[in-house]
Amino acid sequence: MCATLTHAPADSSSPHSRVRPWEGFTPRAVLVALSLIPVNILFMLRGLIWGQSRPATVSLIFNVVISLTLVTMASRVLGRFWPRLRLSPAELAVVYAMLTLSASLSGLDQIQTMVPVVAHPFWAATPENRWEELFLKQVPRWLTVDDPRALWAYFDSHLPLFATPYWRPWLRVAVVWGGFTLMLLWVMFCLCTLLRRNWVEEAKLSFPIIQTPLAIINPRSGFFTSRVAWIGFALAFTIDIINGLHKLYPAVPSILGSYYDLGQQFRTMPWRAIGWTPLNVFPFAVGLAFFIPLDLAFSCWFFYVYWKCVAVFSAGVGLSRIPQAPWIDEQSHAAYQALAVLSLWGARRQIADALRSAWAGPRPEDRFEPMPYRVALIGALAGLAGLTVFCLAAGMSLPAALGFLLLYLGISLAIARIRAELGSPVHDLHRAGPELILTEVFGPRAVGKRNLIMFGFFWAFNRAQRSHPMPHQIEPLKLGELTGAGQRAIAAALGLAALVAIPTAWLIMLDSFCRYGGTHSMWKGYEAFNRLATWLTAPPEPNWYAVGAIGVSGLTTALLAAARLRWAWWPFHPAGYAVSGSWSMQLFAPSVFVSWLVKTLILRYGGMTSYRPASNFFLGMILGEFLAGTFWGILGIIQHRPMYNFLP
């Protein structure tokens, strides 16, 4: 693993007082990050328009890594001539924290979905779909835009945002949903503060995702001077450049650029139930998976195969005749919620300690936390209350609002834990948010029309969880510890990044769709409100099969966790069980398997003496593919045409 920096403690009596709380939060670090946030957001959102790669669909956002690399290299070059211009590792950690959170907020499953969903209902309503009589009369107007002129400017004007006077209704909507997003982020960060010490210092979770930025930031890692790293870089970079040329000029052969769908080989039931099964390898995913602990990597690909077997077995015994069988989405959601409960249970002593500190007042060592525990505790409760008031004002009932919010925060907590412990390349949970569980368990009729309408709008941030912001809050806290950045510095950086990124992303998103047509992502709105229309016109009864599957999955997750505590040799991890049933894991499971196999052979026959050079090689592969992907993305934006996407 990459070497970490050491620091002389300011107070040797306390293990938490290694650095000053605000170390790294300097004007120049903040200025660098603030100048790069709009550039990264513009790259991501204009890339969406022209069909480029979607950086935030995987755990490590590639344009952020490239930005960090360029800043680090520029700092070191300038530092040779003017040492005062060299950014310290702590300052670079602050830069990374601001960039990664802002990029996650601008991701495909955050503002890139929020804007099209909010813009959709009144524009897409027609006499044929009967949305006007079904639900539009009950839609709170402050949640969306109903002005036909403003909608025309967004969908069909092909003019810059401020070229017409119709941008004003969008300002109101952006403030409403931006404020809602900020409240969600605040509650998540309060939870991160309450859990940080347990995850980082007591459980000592490995946080595999941050190993790449750590190697870039840490001058003692030797990454940039490693020949093995540059070999890995050249290999991945060359592969993606050749694949990009193949897309432009088909006569050029591709390398690892095509998909072989194993599912196409099975044409009869029950084997056909295996479904889409792509066999492909992504160099960067192999590199990311190399830093996953072996048992966790094994669990990822093992349970991926397990879910395929479940689908085939269910078809074999006739369950395929029951709608949605074998309820893998519901089972995955239940596994996430079980992981959230287990994470809270495992941190119960730390949470109790934080509660005592919040009640009795701050202790000296608490100043090295991201915020005082009293602020975190009261802030989390106040933030949850604010979110609930938002939902009530929009017409939701109190039980439905609290049920949705608590389930969503459970998903948030589980994803952060999965990332901290497993380092999974993906965690999407497509179309399996809280609204799925609530409607499956109680049925749409019992949930109620007003609540269902809000479930449609909540698709804006709940369609999938690939760019979920909570792990991008707690991972920089760990990176700060390893690079000497103060926890208060990282907290301030994350807060400032959110305040800047949300309005910037809304502005760029609205301007892009006004210029090039809002129909580019209109399908996200159709997903949300067609489902709502189905709930209202043909509401299904409670799905007791799904309820049973949810219970079985929750129990399975608990048993897997108990087995790991009971037997040290137990190879099956509940986090692997949770993430492996998703759509995205179908793309990356073969890469995880290849990485697991290579790492197993290296450790068995080469030992730790071979691990370090190998880790540099795989870090180089990650950076090489990321740089090539950035190059093709920029070229596609400039030429207004799709280029090669190493991220599907």
Image (spheres, grey):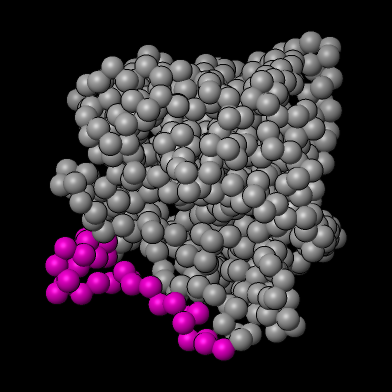
Q: Position of residue 568 (x, y in %)?
A: 78, 62
416 is within the stretch colored magenta: no
Residue 139 picture quarter = top right
**Residue 491 higher or lower than 551, as above or below:** above
Q: Position of residue 574 (x, y in %)?
A: 72, 58
In front of the other: 230 or 42: 42
In front of the other: 511 or 9: 511
Residue 512 picture quarter = top left
Using residue 369 as the reference point, say whether residue 76 is left or right of it.
Answer: left
Residue extending furthest toward the top: 361
Which residue is rendered at x = 38% and y = 48% of the image? 54
In front of the other: 220 or 430: 430
Question: Which quadrant, please, contains the C terminus?
Answer: bottom left
Using residue 26 as the reference point, say whether residue 624 is left or right of it.
Answer: left
Using residue 332 as the reference point, say whether residue 545 is left or right of it.
Answer: right
Which residue is rendered at x = 16% and y = 63% of the image? 248
Residue 397 seen from this side:
yes
Which residue is rendered at x = 62% and y = 34% of the image? 454
Residue 207 seen from this side:
no
Q: Position of residue 587 (x, y in %)?
A: 47, 65
Which residue is rendered at x = 20% and y = 74% of the image? 253
Q: Position of residue 418 (x, y in %)?
A: 63, 49
Identify the magenta region: 239-268
**Residue 388 higher or lower than 427, as above or below:** above
260 is within the stretch colored magenta: yes
